[in-house]
Amino acid sequence: MKTLVHPWPVHGKNTRIVPVFLPFAGCRTRCIYCAQTLQTGKALQGVRPVLDEALSMLRARRRRGLPPCELAFYGGTFTALESSTFELCLQWVGNLMQEGLVASWRCSTRPDCVDGSILADMRACGCTTVELGIQTFVDHVLERSLRGYTSAVACEAMECVLGAGLALGVQLLPGLPGHTQRDFVDDVRKAVASGCSFMRFYPCLVVEGTGLAKLYREGRYVPWSVDTTIDALSEGILLAHEKNIPVIRLGVAVEQGFEEHVLAGPRDLNLGTRILSLALLKLVQGDVARYGRLVHLELPCAVQGYLYGHRRENAALLAKAGLDRTRMSWIDANEIRISCAQ
Ligand code: SF4
């Protein structure tokens, strides 16, 4: 009998991440797919009122007896903020750390807006993690999406973040114009090889008011289907998990009211469940094909929510691979153990 052990990292940090959204702040261009204000549910406003609102919320958290959180600047290009605004944010978050409201902080930004000196300043002020919106490493896709940088720049940026002693998060956006399923798998391979700590996958949606919406209406852009997205992202999950890298987001996190602005794209309320379930199914099927019949399957408890997929859509295929309740047990570990025999 052979037992194959596959890492299955589960994102479950003890520290709560509290986002501070600064839609489009620091953005010099408007990427073809981006609809930050609709997505975050935050209107465009100055940075100061956003920080004031966040401060009130953090103090309310403390009054409720909650521990210091990790703060996250999301929604724009944090490292390209105008210098006085950038300084204001660093000073503000530094004060919050001194006050004991915040334990650490992170930000998201573009790969062409980081350099060693900015990152060193951020790290000195308590930043621990930088999430890079890489989206893809395919140059012609980046160009068509009006991203304004190349794959080489994205790779340099990843090195720069790690070189500054910060944890790296990589955000990918599968399904942009000209982007194929195979491209996405290559993107994940590159991100995994970079030494990132985690990834997020945001399948591309067509949102009203964006450049992509115009292309879509003109028949010049066709979004990925739900099935293509689930298939591609399940491959991505397997590649990431193989290196013990968690994918902490599958699908766009949306605010109430966002849905009505989405014109097209892979929308499915159960997208994450379906992707994870298919990844797991592929893992089992792969080992059974290579090493013989399934003898036993040990699964982390976190998998319980999606083992069989949405409405048990993968139950029959798992049964066909040899899975039944007598061959299955739950373990308290971030790995899947598949025992097979000829
Ligand atoms: S995708 Fe990022 S960089 Fe592009 S416009 Fe939106 S927030 Fe700015």
Image (cartoon, rainbow, N blue to C red):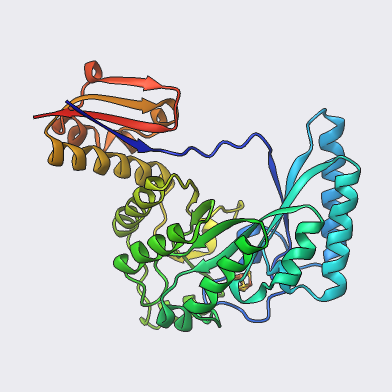
Looking at the image, which residue is at 75% across and 40% down? 69
Question: For this rendering, which residue is in front, 191 or 226?
Answer: 191
User: Does residue 157 lie above or below 326 as drawn?
Assistant: below
User: From what the image shows, is residue 199 above or below residue 57?
Assistant: below
Left or right of 321? Residue 299 is right
Q: Nearer the viewer, residue 258 or 177?
A: 177
Q: Position of residue 92 (x, y in %)?
A: 88, 56
The percent coordinates of residue 65 (x first, y second) are: 82, 28
Residue at the limit of the structure toward the top, as seen here: 326
Q: Is residue 181 left or right of residue 287?
A: right
Indicate the quadrant of ligand 1 in the picture.
bottom right
Q: Which quarter of the figure is the N terminus placed in?
A: top left
With 72 as the anchor, is 205 left or right in this view? Answer: left
User: Percent x, y for residue 11?
Assistant: 53, 39
Would residue 131 be seen by someone viewing this image from the given angle? yes
Relative vertical location of residue 38 with respect to residue 284 in this rendering, above or below:
below
- Quarter containing the C terminus: top left
Residue drawn at x 53%, y 60% as measured from the top left: 170
State whether residue 142 is above or below residue 287. below
